[in-house]
Image (spheres, rainbow, N blue to C red):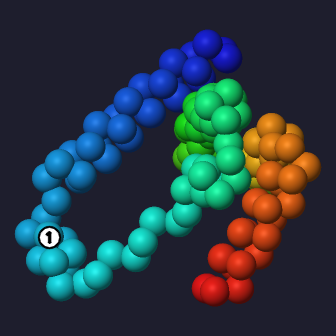
Amino acid sequence: MIKKIQKIASVFFVFTLLFTLGIVCFPSQAAAAASKTQPHPAPPKTIFNFKSQLHLTNTQISKMKKDLQDFQKRLIMDRAKFQLTALKLQSLVKKQAPIPEIKAKLEKEAELQIDMKLADIETARGIEGVLSPVQLKKWREIQKKNQSSR
């Protein structure tokens, strides 16, 4: 059963990826026209934008990038599981399934949301754990400054 769900999640992920690539590669004319007239907001700055100010070593950067890549892989799988659970929940509601079945799916959705948020927090703390105390202090000052300027 689990292998079947993993296979479905993998197929769903591939279709989602292909759909997303189609949108990126072939945007509608309206979207293209809108993007020419509206300025794009600057992408958010990450710790890597401040590597010279923080004096990050290549080893630190490699470790942080690996942690982020592992997090992103996990997030992709967790989002796929969440979307499958949401689809199953919709189906249960639509067919007027018993409340305990619906409750179980709602609890599964909540559990997956908690897992994703916790993975985000754990990754952030893991990245901060790579920094020396001096670098961490400087990084928090940078974050505070950037948050107040928004």
2, above or below 89, in the image: above
The quadrant of the picture occupied by the C terminus is bottom right
Q: In this rendered view, identify the residue nearer to me: 29 or 36.
A: 36
Q: Report the side of 78 relative to 126 (left or right).
A: left
The quadrant of the picture occupied by the N terminus is top right
Quarter of the image for residue 108 reads: top right
Mark yes or no: residue 50 visible. yes
Q: Report the side of 25 relative to 141 (left or right).
A: left
Q: In this rendered view, identify the residue nearer to me: 54 or 110.
A: 54
Q: How many marks?
A: 1
14, above or below 103, in the image: above
Q: Residue at x 79, y 62 (%)?
A: 138
Q: Residue at x 81, y 43 (%)?
A: 131
Where does the image place residue 70, in percent across and percent down from the top left? 64, 29
Q: Which residue is mark 1?
A: 32
Q: Residue at x 51, y 18 (%)?
A: 7
Where does the image place residue 116, in percent across and percent down from the top left? 73, 46
Q: Which residue lies most toward the left here? A: 29
46, above or below 84, in the image: below
Where does the image place residue 74, in percent across and percent down from the top left? 65, 33
Mark yes or no: residue 94 visible. no
Q: Report the side of 127 relative to 39 (left or right).
A: right
